[in-house]
Image (spheres, rainbow, N blue to C red):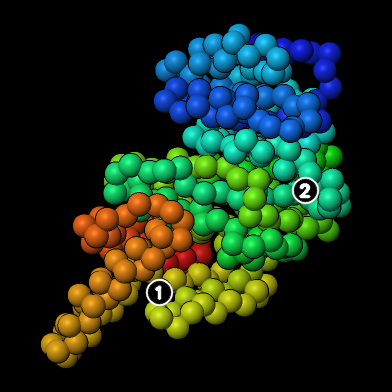
Amino acid sequence: MPAHARNPTVSPVASVIIPYRNAADTLSACLGTLAAQEGAPPFEVVAVDNNSTDQSVRAVQNFADTHPDLPVRLAAEPTPGPAAARNTGVRAARGGLLLFTDADCLPSPGWVAEMVGHFRETPDVGAISGGIRPKAPGGVVEKFTALYTLPPHRREEIHTQYTLLTGGFQTANLGVPRAVFEKAGGFDPRLFTGEDHDLCRRIYQLGLSIRAVPDALVLHRHRTSLKGMMRQAFGYGRAHAYALRHFVPGAVIVALPWLGTLQSMRPRARVWLDLGQADKKLLLLAALAGVRPLLALLLPLYLARLALAARKRANELRVPLSVSEAAVVPLLMVLKAAALTTGRLRGGLGQRVLCF
């Protein structure tokens, strides 16, 4: 049972579920954005502690005490992992619509109202994925991860299947009706990464669609350290191998340098070769330079192209990126790609799939 609840007689339309572990640096700001929601129907906040050892629990308690008009429910889940914590949050929640976000996210003032409105417009969808944009980042690593992690929805789309490359959405900004969530079986607590894509996959198996919308925005804080960035990329790589083994009946995916991606859903096939990543492109150019030294000129040209592309992307996403910072982006891109490749290889060995 929740350790704390406000306004228990109010029946909320939606429940905002936030799992957290040692999130004292970001949790108060996240909760503050929920207290500032505009035009929202009655909703509650369900904060689930997942073995925090810092002041996170105190931050939630202080927030609940200073915002008596917003129903706040505190819960705890000892099993490690956000999937188990979110499942506990759902059990503690009373709303018919489950809105998931993370402790390092900042929902926009109209987030709850817009998500509820989208479900009322399309009541038959299995889930709605709202827009995710980076919070104004600080250092160059945070700016890089903001540019190349969790890309925003550029337009509204309806998805009907999970293909490894499309159809999976993050719980940083995801709404699911309680009935759909329960019918799909909730989150798999065995998964520490990719549990959100797994839930989307099972929603499609129910014959339902997922609507992706560019609004209902959440601002996301991204990794600020090189170590954190590479650890995240490694985890994503391992999750790719697991998804290749367990999330689809079979697939062959081959991404070729500068030529695009070929994908075929083939039963029992387990091949995912991403040769279009920056680390592999750099190795290819270095190999070509070894055969023909004049081709060594392609190496700096490629790195310059990456820097220019980063500047363009930064302008589109309104992330300030100086010329000197853009010059560092190619190195960060290669390091992140190498960590992702290592995670895929490690995961591929464990899952007995070809994931590289």
Res 16 seen here: yes
Asked which secondary structure carries label 2, the reply is helix
Residue under the image location 69 percent in, 32 percent down:
38
Is 263 displayed left or right of 227 in the figure? Answer: right
Name the residue that disc number 2 marks: 118
Q: Would you name the residue on which mark 1 appears?
A: 275
Task: Identify the residue at image location x=40%, y=52%.
Answer: 319
Q: Looking at this rendering, what residue extends furthest in the left direction? A: 293
From this viewpoint, is residue 195 visible?
no
Quadrant assignment, res 262: bottom right
On screen, residue 339 versus residue 119, left or right, reads left
**Does residue 278 sit above or below 49 in this rendering?**
below
Give the mark nearer the N terminus: 1 vs 2. Answer: 2
What is the x, y in percent for residue 126?
A: 79, 50
Please determine whether, in this image, residue 181 is positioned above or below residue 66.
Answer: below
Dot 1 crowding, Cα within 10 Å, few <14, some 14–19, many 20+: some
Q: Position of residue 113 (x, y in %)?
A: 73, 38
| Residue 15 vs residue 166, the one in the foreground | 15
